[in-house]
Image (tube, grey):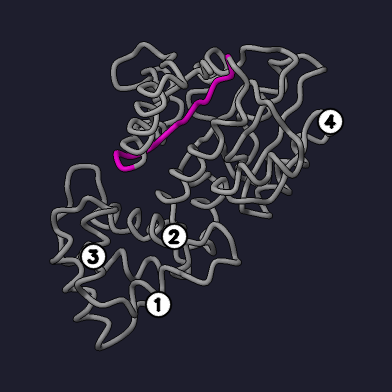
């Protein structure tokens, strides 16, 4: 593992159980991150099976490539946003897939490194970009977007009932002094909102900013729609989401796939599969995770 970054793949046993149907097949990890799921998938399939990992973050790719160096003949990584998954698979002739995994959200790499600007508990710049090529940063949104636009963002993407109050507070404060860091913003939000049990008042605003900066919801829709033609009959698509906005998109698209006869739902748990109590004891960050899986029929 890279430095002191701790990484625990979420719902790992469930993913391996439901995703792998062909020991010699082609598998895609569309959100490579630090390579935890990929490493376990490679261990679970035969030496003839292969896996391709995608990630926008060059640092994540470098870490995963070092981690999986011994599997270099069966594993390759490619820098790309999963919204472009169809183009990548076509160009690399990596199909038909036996399985594909989308593990959404932000990896431990981003939260643990203060300079990436994802954590409100670590002093860092208001960045939040998964890729340095992205021209939009959290700083731009917080310090330049109109108050009404900011309020809508926090309401829609953060699902925060205090969105207008937060946006007005930010707008008033930045007229006197722009927000300079993650802790500056988080501390200010905490100063104007009461703290709910166990939840920092800035949690939803930070989530909204991250989703907006990285166009996460649009990318998810495009990625899931784009990958279906590259799954073989019997191939499976697994998605781990971490908040209701993501899960609604996954649920809606999977329902459409089923309605049109393209897929069937694999997991039987109502509302998707949630982490066990044992997993939550080991990895509290998994508490909001939800796994949904479909299998391609035609």
Could you tell which of marks 3 and 2 lies nearer the N-terminus?
2
- The quadrant where residue 6 appears: top right
Instruction: Name the residue: 45% across, 31% down.
Output: 240
Could you tell which of marks 1 and 3 lies nearer the N-terminus?
1
Is 165 part of what is drawn in magenta?
Answer: no
Is residue 158 shown left or right of residue 254? left
Camera-nearest label, 3 or 2: 3
Q: Are marks 3 and 4 in contact (CB under 8 Å)?
A: no
Camera-nearest label, 4 or 2: 4
Could you tell which of marks 4 and 1 lies nearer the N-terminus?
4
Tell me the crowding category of disc 1: few under 14, some 14 to 19, or many 20 or more residues within 10 angstroms, Cα based: some
Mark pair 3, 4: CA separation = 46 Å
Label annotation for residue 189: 3
Label annotation for residue 180: 1
Instruction: Name the residue: 68% across, 39% down.
Output: 89
The boundaries of the magenta stretch are 234-245
């Amino acid at each position: 593992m890279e430095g002191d970054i701790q990484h625990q793949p979420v719902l790992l046993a469930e993913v391996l159980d439901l995703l792998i149907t062909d020991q010699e097949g082609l598998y895609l990890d569309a959100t490579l991150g630090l390579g935890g799921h990929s490493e376990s998938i490679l261990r679970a399939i035969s030496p003839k099976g292969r896996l391709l990992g995608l990630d926008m973050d060059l640092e994540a790719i470098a870490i995963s490539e070092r981690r999986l160096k011994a599997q270099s003949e069966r594993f390759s990584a490619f820098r790309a946003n999963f919204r472009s998954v169809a183009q990548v698979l076509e160009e690399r002739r990596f199909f038909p897939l036996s399985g594909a995994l989308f593990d959404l959200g932000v990896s431990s790499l981003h939260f643990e490194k203060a300079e990436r600007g994802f954590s409100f508990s670590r002093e860092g710049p208001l960045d939040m970009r998964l890729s340095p090529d992205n021209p939009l940063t959290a700083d731009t949104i917080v310090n330049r977007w109109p108050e009404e636009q900011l309020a809508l963002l926090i309401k829609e993407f953060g699902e925060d009932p205090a969105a207008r109050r937060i946006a007005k507070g930010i707008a008033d404060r930045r007229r006197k002094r722009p927000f300079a860091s993650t802790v500056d913003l988080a501390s200010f939000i905490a100063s104007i909102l009461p703290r709910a049990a166990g939840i920092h008042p800035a949690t939803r605003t930070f989530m909204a900013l991250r989703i907006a900066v990285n166009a996460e919801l649009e990318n998810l829709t495009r990625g899931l729609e784009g990958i279906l033609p590259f799954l073989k009959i019997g191939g499976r698509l697994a998605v781990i989401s971490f908040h209701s906005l993501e899960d609604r998109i996954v649920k809606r698209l999977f329902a459409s796939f089923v309605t049109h006869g393209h897929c069937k739902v694999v997991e039987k748990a109502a509302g998707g599969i949630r982490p066990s109590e044992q997993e939550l004891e080991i990895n509290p960050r998994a508490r909001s995770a939800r796994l949904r899986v479909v299998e391609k029929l035609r």
